[in-house]
Image (spheres, helix red, strand yellow):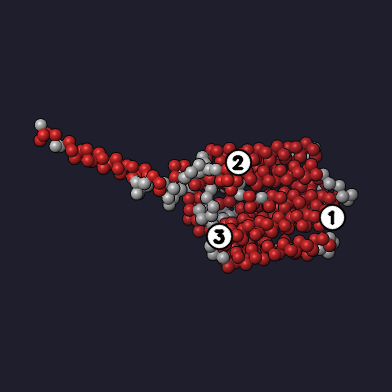
């Protein structure tokens, strides 16, 4: 009986070894569950669930100045256009709600779309909700659509207030552009067209639209301001893409920075950010307070210097923050120059 029992022992050892290998695969190379959050973030099991601060970070608050600045500029231009200094504060707030909700919505939509495509697998910047596995893709999508819905409601209220029903089409196009930046089968953000659409919707549409819903017309102040803040919005996108140029190239995401290269991209960034100050010089001839907008160069020039000389992701993130706040300062100061 003892001899007959011996053949079973190797099978037990093999089973035990197989179990250990399975556990090692589950817990990582070391077999230690404590190291599950190690090198790569590959799915929900690899990271902790997203916290409230993670969701706030996912909204990318540093980009919100790009939504606020056009509303200040458009409102200032509207006050000029009315002639009597009339201020439609309710319509201005609704325009602000549309712009901010669209900006947050597009940020979450990008998080979702880039995450499910795997574009963020090689990301060098802050971790994304979807790509890191901290939040389920469906949840991120629902949050994105919720902000698009809030923007649509605020826009509908503006349409009702102005009785300009054709603006509904503009709203639909804006939401579609926000989604198709990285969503859909052929996202235009992957084809080097991101800056063009940012210029159109976060520059022209946002500024001119804000002026129109308050004044019923657009003027030179609105047009030149829209072009200028559109360039600054392009600068923010460019420096962001310069930071991600290597992982984007590896992932097949052909941003403008990838297409023209890092050196040319840095030069284009400086043009985007500094050209709007030519507009400030022009308006200073007619609005004395516009001269104070030149103080924004205290943010813009360091951003250019850092972008041209910086090579690390941290440096370019700092340049992005400076550029974003430069856009806010530009919009607020020049908008107040018009209004006052």
Which percent across, then down, holds residue 331? Answer: 74, 55
Q: Which label sits in the foreground, 2 or 3?
A: 3
Among the 4 quarters of the image, the one containing residue 257: bottom right
In the rendered image, the vertical position of residue 282 relative to residue 120, given as above or below: below
Residue 99 location in percent, x, y? Answer: 70, 46
Q: Identify the residue at image location x=61%, y=49%.
A: 60
Q: Is residue 34 above or below residue 11?
A: below
Q: Which mark is residue 340?
A: 1
Q: Which residue is mark 3?
A: 314
Label 1 neighbourhood size at 10 Å, few (<14), some (14-19), many (20+)?
A: few
Residue 16 seen by the camera? yes
**Residue 152 image point, x, y percent:** 69, 39
Q: Quick one: label 1 or label 2, which is nearer the N terminus?
A: 2
Residue at the front extreme, as displayed: 34
Q: Marks 2/3: CA distance?
A: 27 Å
Q: Position of residue 217 (x, y in %)?
A: 82, 48
């Amino acid at each position: 009986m003892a001899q007959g029992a011996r053949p079973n022992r190797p099978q037990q050892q093999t089973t035990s070894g197989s179990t250990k290998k399975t556990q090692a695969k589950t817990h990582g190379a070391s077999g230690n569950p404590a190291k599950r959050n190690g090198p790569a973030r590959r799915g929900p099991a690899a990271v902790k669930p997203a916290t409230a601060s993670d969701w706030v970070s996912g909204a990318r608050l540093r980009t919100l100045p790009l939504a606020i600045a056009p509303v200040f500029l458009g409102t200032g231009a509207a006050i000029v256009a009315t002639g009597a200094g009339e201020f439609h504060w309710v319509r201005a707030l609704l325009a602000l709600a549309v712009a901010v909700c669209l900006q947050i919505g597009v940020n979450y939509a990008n998080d979702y779309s880039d995450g499910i495509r795997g574009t963020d697998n090689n990301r060098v910047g802050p971790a994304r909700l979807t790509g890191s596995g901290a939040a389920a893709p469906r949840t991120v999508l629902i949050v994105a659509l919720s902000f698009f819905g809030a923007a649509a409601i605020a826009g509908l209220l503006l349409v009702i207030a102005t009785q300009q029903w054709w603006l509904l089409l503009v709203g639909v196009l804006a939401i579609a552009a926000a989604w198709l930046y990285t969503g859909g089968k052929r996202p235009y953000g992957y084809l080097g067209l991101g800056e063009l659409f940012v210029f159109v919707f976060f520059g022209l549409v946002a500024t001119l639209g804000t002026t129109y819903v308050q004044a019923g017309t657009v003027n030179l102040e609105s047009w030149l301001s829209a072009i200028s803040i559109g360039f600054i919005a392009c600068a923010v996108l460019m420096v962001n893409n310069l930071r991600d140029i290597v992982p984007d190239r590896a992932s097949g995401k052909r941003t403008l920075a990838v297409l023209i290269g890092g050196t040319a991209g840095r030069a284009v960034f400086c043009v985007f950010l500094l050209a709007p100050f030519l507009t400030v010089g022009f308006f200073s001839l007619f609005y004395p307070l516009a001269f104070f907008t030149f103080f924004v160069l205290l943010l813009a020039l360091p951003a250019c210097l850092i972008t041209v000389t910086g090579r690390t992701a941290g440096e370019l993130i700092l340049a992005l923050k400076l550029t974003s706040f430069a856009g806010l300062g530009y919009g607020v100061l020049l908008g107040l120059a018009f209004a006052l």
